[in-house]
Image (cartoon, helix red, strand yellow):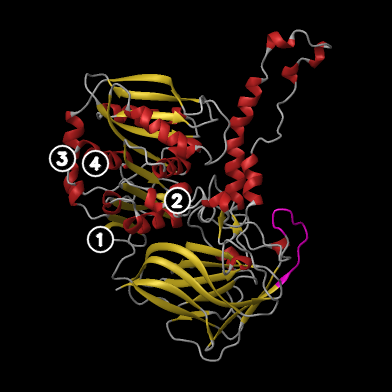
Amino acid sequence: MWSRVTMVLAGAALCAAMGLATRTAAAENHEITVERNVAAKMRDGVTLRADIYRPKAEGKFPVLLVRTPYDKQGISGFGIKGAARGYVVIAQDVRGRFESEGEWYTFKNEMQDGYDTVEWAAGLPYSNGKVGMFGGSYVGATQFLAALAKPPHLAGICPSVTASNYHDGWTYQGGAFEQWFNESWASGLARNTMRRRAEQKYDPLGGTTVLPLISYPVLEPPSGEGIAPYFKDWLAHPNFDEYWKQISIEDHYGEIQVPVRNVAAWYDIFLGGSLKNYVRLKTEGGTEAARRGQRLRVSVGGHAGGGRKIGAVDFGEKLQTDADEEMLRWYDWLLKGEANGVEKEKPVKIFVMGKNDWREEEDWPLARAKNTKYYLHSAGGANGIAGDGTLSTGAPAEEKPDQYVYDPSDAAPTIGGPLCCGALPTGIGPEDQRPAEARGDVLVYTTPAFAKDTEVTGPVALELYASSSAVDTDFTGMLVDVWPNGFAQNLTSGILRMRYRNSQEKAELANPGETHHIMVDLWATSNVFLAGHKLRLEVSSSNFPRFDRNLNTGEEQARGTRMVKATNVIYHDKAHPSALILPIVP
């Protein structure tokens, strides 16, 4: 799992240019040499270690650098490929991981260590001084954080399926704790930390004086105290405070001075941030080269899986492309100056689901997409798939509200969706949502079947007028494509914790019974609802265990154990026109 996440590379390519790229690769097919565990000393004296793959030839070459917490040996396949292509590929274990010295703590040291490593790599005798970075997930974070430090020899980065903010869109979303990801990711990280502790205890000579003999320390497990201090710190900082602001990419876009090739994926856990990085760097990047050098490629899967079948849906033979080759073509153009056609390509390439085909675009979001409100309607009984909830572009008149009881001890379950690290028993990515839609605490609103293909491509939002009997609760939304056979395919979803309805920086409890106008960010999608399909919205108050359950008490979530039920109400009348806001492509 961890090496797979690390190796997420990906890119954008024109078929017409592929012949030139292939000839270039064939013309530059070097023998290679590999050096293991090469030391690089950071400014505070800590030594980090890297494997270096390089051409076995005279001369100097551009560098492709990856800094990973998931074991640098997982990069060997690409290292060999890149070195044969005429690059020095450097794979480094970040501080406190595998063969590198120091203490591991998420995000904390990546800015200065990234700067120091880029400059060290640029000064190697076989480097030409141009350094590009690559990799996905946390390895995307090591790129962005290094770029914020502005190392002089960094020439470009290629972050895949990564975030723009390590509070919202990574550890939390809409104020809710990303429970499945945070617990599974921290558990995976802790394995290497525990192994390192166990190795430090291995001291046969020192143990020879210990009596009684049965107390020889090898029989004692290493302490688990402080094995993942960052996990408790994440919980201690639910608000967007200075703990998060100092490492927030989106708060410091002006510090990024190099071109960025952003790679995202529908159903990826970091989709929202990946798209935001592209959109905002176009105007907020620190140099003209950064602003004009933005590229975006959106595939399907990311952390939710690879191959043509993601979750329960087969997206066809066109989905899979050679991600390594696409990224190398971009770097051939950027670092080597090759006229391989990359400079003529449109900046955005997306995979359109439903039609299951790739499409190039001038920009993201699409200028031609028209934000269209699909209003919620019912006679007060939208509970579950057998209810009377409908969606239409006609505004509501006087209608009864819908209500349901949200019980944290019986929360609506996560079925597929953007998950990491590993699938739940209910699946990952696109899965059939009908089991959740059978529940009374899930409101279901559906359009009639479309008479013709209808495309939704761009950001999706849910505008609700809602109240609760509790001082705090959550509201969730999910966009669904209903197939003619009834299969209910989740497309994109979101959540809002009511205490953060006005600000992520300051929590404000609600007055029970008061109606609030709220917006739930459902991130984005690109999907053609084929003729005969229906468009559906699900509204509820949990998506567990992807997100932690709101206990409805208003207490500190990290330490709360007491639960209360909440009666939650969704209004959809003339004065409260709740609506799903969709970007419809004409």
Q: Badge 2: how crowded within 10 Å, few (<14), some, or many (20+)?
A: many
Q: Which residue is mark 4?
A: 334
The answer to whether residue 179 is seen in the rendering is: yes
Indicate which disc, 4 or 1, sits on the residue closer to the N terminus: 4
Residue 366 image point, x, y percent: 31, 66
Any magenta on residue 319? no
Residue 249 is tagged as 2
The residue under label 3 is which amino acid type?
Leu
Q: Secondary structure at mark 3?
A: helix
Asked whether 37 or 586 is in front, the reply is 37
Indicate which disc, 1 or 2, sits on the residue closer to the N terminus: 2
Any magenta on residue 565? yes
The residue under label 4 is which amino acid type?
Leu
Image point (75%, 8%), residue name: 208
Which residues, given as a range, are shown in magenta? 556-566
Residue 523 image point, x, y percent: 45, 62
Q: Badge 4: how crowded within 10 Å, few (<14), some, or many (20+)?
A: some
Tell which tag, 4 or 1, sits nearer the viewer. Answer: 4
Q: Which residue is mark 3?
A: 20
Asked whether 117 or 157 is in front, the reply is 117
Asked whether 129 or 307 is in front, the reply is 129
Tell which tag, 1 or 2, sits nearer the viewer. Answer: 2
Residue 362 is tagged as 1
Indicate which disc, 3 or 4, sits on the residue closer to the N terminus: 3
CA distance separating discs 4 and 1: 20 Å
Image point (74%, 69%), residue name: 565
Indicate which disc, 1 or 3, sits on the residue closer to the N terminus: 3
Is residue 392 positioned above or below 583 on the image? below
CA distance separating discs 4 and 2: 23 Å
CA distance separating discs 1 and 2: 24 Å
Q: Secondary structure at mark 1?
A: loop
Residue 100 image point, x, y percent: 51, 26
